[in-house]
Amino acid sequence: MNPCRSAVSLARGLARFGDLRAQRTIAGLNDYEVELAKVKGEFVRHTHQETDELFLVVHGRLTIRLRDGDVTLGAGESFMVPRGFEHCPVADEETHILLVEPAGVINTGDAGGPLTRAAEPLG
Amino acid sequence: MNPCRSAVSLARGLARFGDLRAQRTIAGLNDYEVELAKVKGEFVRHTHQETDELFLVVHGRLTIRLRDGDVTLGAGESFMVPRGFEHCPVADEETHILLVEPAGVINTGDAGGPLTRAAEPLG
């Protein structure tokens, strides 16, 4: 069996990157990417004008602040932020999330700033 | 808050469809769909020539038989079946999976047959 065709354990993957706010690609899916992220604290309020973005909380608790209210996700809960919707993810505790979005999407969308970074492959 | 902009709990979603082998769309993501499925037993060996397909096991255990070996996924493990790869999902026990793939992909790919069905929205 080709090793690149083995299962990816979300827990083992998350254990391999220590940094909070790290974001790692665990799989390509056509021209999309599946990413794992560790987050804590408040991210930056931003918008992806060109794409929807799927959040699935694996561990912890994530609040996604939207213009018309908050959505709070616990483990095993998902939410799709529609394109063009300003959103600000906030996690009071260390939270692990799975993201699905087109490859190359900038994490901070139209906001830019110091939290902008590309998702790296899970080494 | 618009009710369509609330979190989707995978567990609550799964509890709402009783049938094994049911497949329900829980979110659109641009021209992709995020689906939940309950499976048990052997599916049909098939290929999607036009797309990769992402599997994430939420509960249970899924073996994906490939031509060059099997990949077995427990809860919290994912696997991307590349386009053009013949595969046959098999679950010895009731297993719950999350799938991500382009909207309109036929579940049985090129194989057709009695298991062919469209994913319905989670009502």
Image (cartoon, coloured by chain):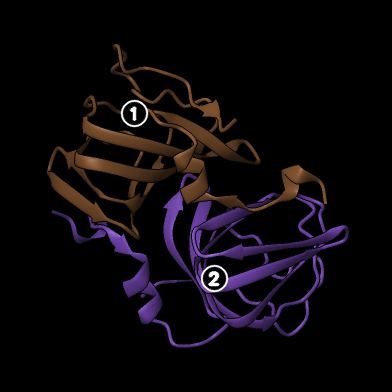
Chain colours: A brown, B purple
Q: Is residue A14 above or below residue B65?
A: above
- Residue B45 in percent (x, y) is at 80, 71
Residue at left offset 70%, top offset 51%? A6
Q: Is residue A91 above or below residue B37?
A: above
Labels 2, 1: front one: 1
- Residue A91 in percent (x, y) is at 21, 39
- Residue B17 in percent (x, y) is at 42, 82
Quadrant in which the C terminus of chain B is drawn:
bottom left
Mark 1 neighbour density, 10 Å: few (under 14) some (14–19) many (20 or more): some
Using the rendered view, name the quadrant where residue B20 is placed.
bottom right
In three-dimensional space, the C-alpha distance between marks 2 and 1, rounded to whole angstroms, equals: 35 Å
User: Which of the pair B106/A17 is nearer the observer?
Assistant: A17
SS state under label 1: loop
Kind of residue indicated by mark 2: Ala
User: Which of the pair B36/A52 is nearer the observer?
Assistant: B36
In the picture of the structure, the residue carrying the numbered disc 2 is: B119
- Residue B115 in percent (x, y) is at 69, 81
SS state under label 2: loop
Kind of residue indicated by mark 1: Arg
Q: Give the letter of the chain under mark 2.
A: B
In the picture of the structure, the residue carrying the numbered disc 1 is: A21
Mark 2 neighbour density, 10 Å: few (under 14) some (14–19) many (20 or more): many
User: Which of the pair A76/B32 is nearer the observer?
Assistant: A76
Residue A16 seen in render: yes
Q: Is residue A25 above or below residue B50?
A: above
Residue at left offset 80%, top offset 67%? B46
